[in-house]
Amino acid sequence: MNLARRTMNNPVFALLYERAWRPTSFLLATGRTMQADRRDAVRTLRLDAGDRVLDIACGPGNFTHYLSEHIGPGYAVGIDFSVPMLRQAVADNSGPRAGYVRGDARRLPFPDNSFDAVCCFGALYLIPDPLTAAAEMIRVLAPGGRIAISTSHRPQGWVGEVSSAVGGAGGLHVFDLDTFPKLFAESGLVDIVQEVHGLLQYVSARAADAA
């Protein structure tokens, strides 16, 4: 297990993650607040009453619970591999429309077309095989459903080379800007939108409607 995964499985880090680590690191990386990011997630996913939402690598459930408050009688499922993170999610972010499952993002325990919205915010770079995880996200997305991710990107020039080297040493992936738009397009997704904020890229798309 690499350094990044060991950190995510540390109970002390799980306790501090939502309270201190993520808000601070996110602000430094993007210049944005977590509150703004969560509001944008609801807008990007175009959530509606009754939607079924899957939050990949949910950590302590900060997004999962927030999304569950915007889907009326629907439900949001957070999935993560880290037991300490899931314990923190249950303790801090449980709700009548939010639930949590332990599982591997590379082998999601859900049938095809199970969710109206699938997301992974700030975590794909931690997963050992992130492109497989992204393909799994697309597999469980229902026709007409929305997908959204935020993840690292490789800046141009020497900064990109340094970020790749440092990230690789710690078990973090750094992606080219065309990686996910290309994957989404090749998988038949439409309405692909990409934005870059600081060190993170945001990519969203929609599954084609059923024939």
Image (cartoon, grey):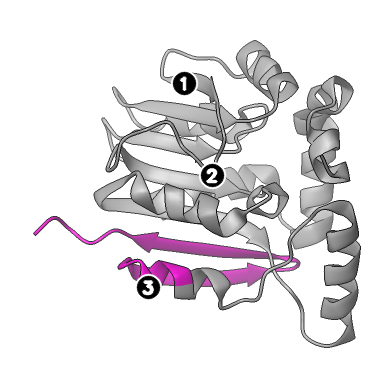
Is residue 181 shown left or right of residue 62?
A: left
Residue 50 vs residue 23: left or right?
left
| Amino acid type assigned to the residue bearing label 3 in the image | Glu
**Amino acid type at mark 2:** Arg
Q: Residue at x 79, y 34 (%)?
A: 8
Q: Which residue is mark 2?
A: 106
Label located before the other in sequence (1 or 3) = 1
| Residue 43 seen in render | no
**Front residue (pair 209, 127):** 127
Instruction: Please tell me in which quadrant of the rendered image residue 14 appears.
Output: top right
Residue under pointer 1: 98
Q: Mark 1 against mark 3, which lies toward the viewer?
A: 3
**Of the two numbered discs 1 and 2 in the rendering, the one whose residue sits closer to the viewer:** 2
Which portion, as a residue range, is magenta? 183-211
Asked if residue 71 is among those painted magenta in the image, a careful observer would answer no
- 195 vs 97: above or below: below
Q: CA distance from mark 2 to mark 3?
A: 19 Å
SS assignment at label 1: strand
Kindly identify which residue carries mark 3.
186
Earlier in the chain: of badge 2 and badge 3, it is 2
The image quadrant where one finds the N terminus is top right
Quarter of the picture containing the C terminus is bottom left
**In front of the other: 93 or 173:** 173
User: Which residue: 44% across, 48% down?
Assistant: 136
Q: Quick one: 120 or 40, which is closer to the camera? A: 120
Label 1 environment density (alpha carbons within 10 Å; few <14, some 14–19, many ≥20): many
Above or below 42: residue 65: above
Q: Position of residue 182 (x, y in %)?
A: 47, 75
Indicate which disc, 1 or 2, sits on the residue closer to the N terminus: 1
Q: Position of residue 76 (x, y in %)?
A: 42, 28
Q: Secondary structure at mark 2?
A: loop
Assign a secondary structure to mark 3.
Answer: helix
